[in-house]
Each structure stands twice: as C-alpha cells, then as structure tokens.
Image (cartoon, helix red, strand yellow):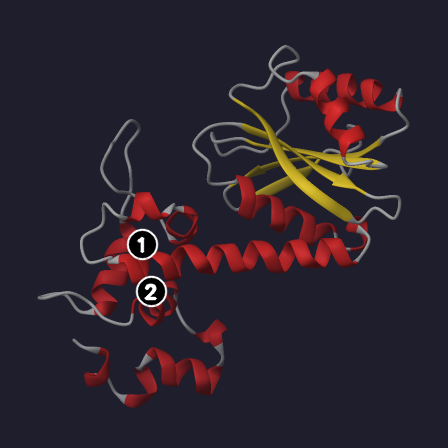
Amino acid sequence: MPLKDLPLDAQPREKLLARGAAALSDAELLALLLRTGIKGKGVLQMAHELLQLKSSPGDQNEGFDGIAGLLHASADDLKRVKGLGPAKRAELVAVLELARRALAQQLRARTVFATPDAVKHYLQLQLAAKPHEVFAILFLDVQNRLLVMEELFRGTLTQTSVYPREVVLRALHHQAAAVVLAHNHPSGTVQPSRADEALTQTLKTALALIDVRVLDHVIVAPGEALSMAERGLL
C-alpha cells in the first residue's frame, strides 16, 4: 500500500511530527528516507525487506541484517539492491556520516571521558560493522579532546601485526598527549582475548617512552562496546 493510502495517523511523516521519531519503527524511519518504492512494491514493504536481508558467510549477494548493517553499508554495497538509485544510496550513506560527524564534534569540543558513552557510540559507528578486524587510535590533546582518529592496521590483531613503532610515530606526528586504542571483533563478542591484553600492555609501554598515556582500549561489535579501563584491564 502506498504511504498516501495509509490512515493519516499511520503515515510515517505525520506520525513522526505528532509523536516524535522514537515512535516510528526502523522500517518506518527507513521508508521516510526512501520516500518511494518500486513497481509492484510499496516503500514500506521495500523498507521491511531491506531490513530483513541477511548474508550467509561468504555470500556475495546483498545482505545487511537490520538497520545497523544497512546504514554501515557503502554506496557500492547498496548498488546491489534493486530499487536503490543514486539519490537513495547517497541519502542512506549520508545519514551515517552525519551521525559520525556529530559525535566527533562532541569529542572535539569536550574532554573525551566526560562523555564515555559518546566515545563508545562513535567507535561503534566507525568500526562495529566492518567485516574484518580494524585497529584504530583516537589521538587526544592535553585536555583529552579528540584531535583525530586513524585506522592503522587491519587483520587479526597480535603483537606482531600491530607495530608499536608506527603507533609511536603517529602519536608524535599529531603531538598527542594521550590515546584511546580501539578495535572491532567481527565475531560479535567484545570480550578481550589474551592477545588483546598483551597488545595493550605492549603499546602502553612503548607510548610511555614519549610521555603519551593510554587512557583506554575499547573493543566494539554490533550493538556492544567494552572498555578495558572500566574492566580494570588497562
């Protein structure tokens, strides 16, 4: 059924304006972004189907498995979905980028650990949906405000695949006073491994030589984030 044929109080736009965005389902919010469906498929049906797509391991077909997966998809990923033209693809990718920039602006404007949840949310938006492990660093100034985030390494994280020398050089380049280490677990669990703990201590020791403090190591997965500092593992 086209959106215009729904009862007025059930149409997503009117529902949002009357009751707030939180009152809408994921599919309704997505339908607002998509605006129109395709021949033989209304926009709400299309939104539901997009959210229900799943990818099997090794599957090359489109699959997003919910709103987080969909909004973490790249413009190229979205090309595989029938009915998503350039404009719709651009809008979906822009939504996530706006969220990233809003959180980054908060972290640049205030002490990072005044808003620890914002740090976790920011890192989830950046890393959680990646299909491979990524090691990243938040470089901070003397007031623990964000200078920049950099993704430095990819692949399974071990003491041999993350190079302390490169981390030290990047910290010196940014004149950082402190850092937050971060990586994702594509497996979905945020529990740190022994390798994670060993790597944290190795980098902490290396960075201490140039008076750069390691404030935390955050592990993220879709819908979850763990602070090793909060767990007493730093």
Q: Left or right of 60: which side holds 151?
A: right
Check the image and report above or below for 108 versus 77.
Answer: below
Q: Which residue is mark 2?
A: 27
- Residue type beneath disc 2: Ala
- Residue type beneath disc 1: Leu
User: Which x, y percent locates residue 16?
Assistant: 43, 80
Q: Quadrant of residue 77?
A: top left
Looking at the rendering, in which quadrant would you find the C terminus?
top right
Q: Residue at x 62, y 49 (%)?
A: 122
Label pair 1/2, CB-CB below 8 angstroms: yes
Secondary structure state at the residue bearing disc 2: helix
Q: Nearer the viewer, residue 71 or 197?
A: 71
Q: Nearer the viewer, residue 83 or 191?
A: 83
Q: Left or right of 22: which side holds 121?
A: right
Q: Nearer the viewer, residue 203 or 50?
A: 203
User: Which x, y percent locates residue 207?
Assistant: 82, 23
Secondary structure state at the residue bearing disc 1: helix
Q: Which mark is residue 24?
A: none
Q: Left or right of 112: which side holds 92?
A: left
- Count of numbered badges drawn on the protein: 2
Q: Left or right of 140: which side holds 124?
A: left
Q: Residue at x 37, y 85 (%)?
A: 14
Q: Which residue is mark 1?
A: 51
Q: Looking at the image, can residue 64 be seen?
A: no
Q: Looking at the image, can residue 35 be seen?
A: yes
Q: Residue at x 18, y 69 (%)?
A: 42
User: Which x, y percent locates residue 119?
Assistant: 68, 48
Looking at the rendering, in which quadrant would you find the N terminus?
bottom left
Q: Residues within 10 Å of mark 1 (few under 14, many from 20)?
A: some
Check the image and report above or below for 94 versus 160.
Answer: below
Q: Quadrant of residue 170?
A: top right
**Which residue sits furthest front?**
173
